[in-house]
Amino acid sequence: AVGLALSAGAAFADTMANAFGNTVVVTYPNGAQARYHFNADNTFGIHGADGSHVMGTYELANGQLCLTPAGGERACAAYVGDKNVGDTWTQTATDGSTINVTL
């Protein structure tokens, strides 16, 4: 399952715009990390903690970031819209767990 979960902020597009060309690192409760790369064309890639690489598409809708991995199911979570490169925050993942996110 895709675990990235980005809560609604006033500056809706800023976090995604700042993510383009940078890496979003998600640290799961077990300490494992995944690296997400978002592109301006609404595609993304994930380098999983297990060495896997997944591609897919994303959409920002109704205050949520929704990810659809190739061959997988769409998963949505609250979108945090006011983050810049160097920021780290805690939020709820699509599976309900708490994750740490660094841009």
Image (tube, grey):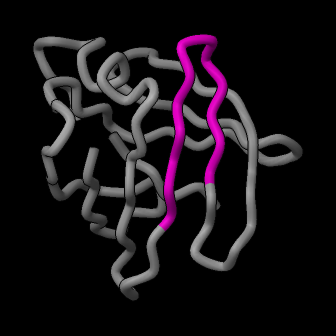
Residue 36 falls within the magenta-colored stretch: yes
**In the figure, 49 relative to 84: above or below?**
below
Image quadrant where residue 12 sits: top left
**In the figure, 18 relative to 67: above or below?**
above
Is 36 left, or right, of 23 in this rendering? right
Prevailing SS of the magenta stretch: strand
Q: Foreground residue, 35 or 74?
A: 35
Q: Residue at x 39, y 87 (%)?
A: 30
Residue 55 image offset from top left, x and y in percent: 75, 42
Residue 4 falls within the magenta-colored stretch: no
Q: Residue at x 39, y 47 (%)?
A: 24
Q: Residue at x 15, y 53 (%)?
A: 89
Query: Over which residues does the magenta segment extend?
Result: 34-46
Is 50 left, or right, of 55 in this rendering? left
Q: Foreground residue, 48 or 97?
A: 48
**Looking at the image, which residue sits at the far right?**
71
